Amino acid sequence: MLDLRLLRSDPDSAANALAARRADIEQFKEVLRLDERHRHLLRRLDELRHEINTLSGTVGQLRSRGLVDEAAKPIERSRRLRAEVKALSHNAASQAETIRSLLLQLPNLPATECPRGDGADANRVLKVEGSSPESYGDHQRVPHWEFATEKGWLDIERATKLSGSMFVLFRGAGARLSRALVLLALDRNSDLYEEIRPPTLVHTETMVSTGHLPKFADDAYHLPRDDLWAIPTGEVPLTSLCKDEVLDEADLPMRMMAHTSCFRREAGAAGRDTRGLLRVHEFDKVEILAYATPAQAQDIHQEILKRASDVLEELGLAYRVVDICTGDLGNSSARTFDLEVYAPGAGRWLECSSVSWFSDYQARRANVRYRPSGGGRPRLVHTLNGSALAVPRVWAALTETWRNPDGSMTVPPVLREYMGGVEIIGG
RNA sequence: GGAGAGGUGGCCGAGUCCGGUUGAAGGCGCUCCCCUGCUAAGGGAGUAAGGGCAUGACAGUUCUUCGUGGGUUCAAAUCCCACCCUCUCCGCCA
């Protein structure tokens, strides 16, 4: 959520920033208009309440001195004022609600460094690491959905039988490989990031805090009977972990990681990227996330990016870093670097991590604050996160990249300790 | 799911029966100052959040908030209703 006072004090730059990401400017202007009226009403209410408070003080004093008759007049006046307050405060409350719901729909302001542009075409590739797409052998250019099923590592047909299309099932060495990737990602970050195993079902409010609701309700699974939502990412519970808390500045940055299932309805994506593991409804992911002071935020952003890309490097995968432009930025983000891993069999770059800086947009919704070391008012933290490793797409790129001419797969050295020391699978 | 107890400021904890100068005693923590050669101990002062108005800044002023929402009243932490959450016991269950 954006800071209303900031919008008020500099509406033009806010409007420009929002326009850069193609947000609804009319909605933004409506917020400002309503806010103006709302504040006017608040002022009037304050005056009325002040008078009521004064009058009841008077009544109390008169009565304590036994002057009951003298109290009749202020009581009568106060009673009339109360009626007025009731009527007006009803209006004020509904105004505030409208303002909030409009505000919740407005996306974050993109960072000034964020490349301008209307869509994915304007995203900027910052760097490319590892083998070039042309350098792979024919044996690596086989898509995973062809050989992995054959090898018994992946069983999409049966997963579909259980849960429908776009659900997948790993088995045998494939399942173990999935688990190995999770363990690797956790181990590589356990030096600084506290491991957390959060709930995967959360309240509506928790989903609102990260910005996944109210705008993107269609993308998430909802259990109406208990009004719980299946998290689309570990970012959701981690961001709200310290909801309504005031942290000490000395505790920042506060780093956390979580391995969870992630659930996505992928509404509107039906028929797109549906082969194999390219786009699935449920997947495992290790998320890393930090609360930081505004001053620490940029360093942490780079730190998360480095950690996420280091794992890909260790796995011997080619990847690139993409600086997401304003028009393609996620709703809550001020700046995002996507990591895309190259899958030679699928023949394309697969987005496997979005490393984002949310400024105070999520923290304002979740109300996560810190008290500055020098004292003073609590301030909102900044939130940052990224996938340390999202299993399916990395699994896909990995099995394709490390595929041998005989159809077996060499287990990358870093994964062997998690694979029972095995060097080759499917031989 | 049943019975009981409880939800108060950064934390602990009074106040709730008998509504009024209590935004809230006391303590802890924290900040500043004093004292002590250092440390330990001691003394003093300050210290909730959010919003409106106003301001160059500091100060100021006012409103709201004692789990949440509603009600009664001139006046609610305190009375009434509903709901949520926590704890203990019982039941059920991996």
Image (cartoon, coloured by chain):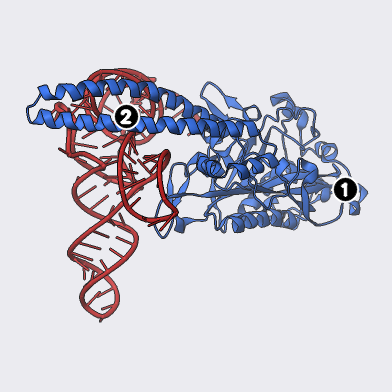
Chain colours: A blue, B red
Image side of residue A101 versus residue A135, left or right: left
- Using the rendered image of the protein, determine whether residue A63 is visible from the camera's viewpoint: yes
Tell me if residue B44 comes above or below residue A425 in the rendering.
below
**Do the residues marked 2 and 1 share a common chain?**
yes
Specify the subunit that label 2 lies on.
A
Pointer 2 or 1: first along the chain: 2
> Looking at the image, can residue A213 be seen?
no
Please indicate whether residue A177 sits to the left or right of residue B20 in the image: right
Q: Position of residue B5 (x, y in %)?
A: 25, 31
| Residue for badge 1 | A140
Disc 1 marks a residue whose amino acid type is Gln
Q: Secondary structure at mark 1?
A: helix
Where's residue A285, x and y in %? Answer: 65, 43
Q: Nearer the viewer, mark 2 or mark 1?
A: 2
Residue receiving disc 2: A48
Q: Is residue A69 above or below residue A337?
A: above
Q: Nearer the viewer, residue A305 or A376?
A: A376
* Residue at image point 65% right, 40% down: A18
Mark 2, secondary structure of its residue? helix
- What amino acid does circle 2 point to? Leu
Disc 1: CA contacts within 10 A as few (<14), some (14-19) or many (>=20): many
| Left or right of residue A201, residue A174 in this image | right
User: In the image, residue A380 lies at what x, y percent?
Assistant: 49, 48
How packed mark 2 is, by other alpha carbons closer than 10 Å (few <14, some 14-19, many 20 or more), is some
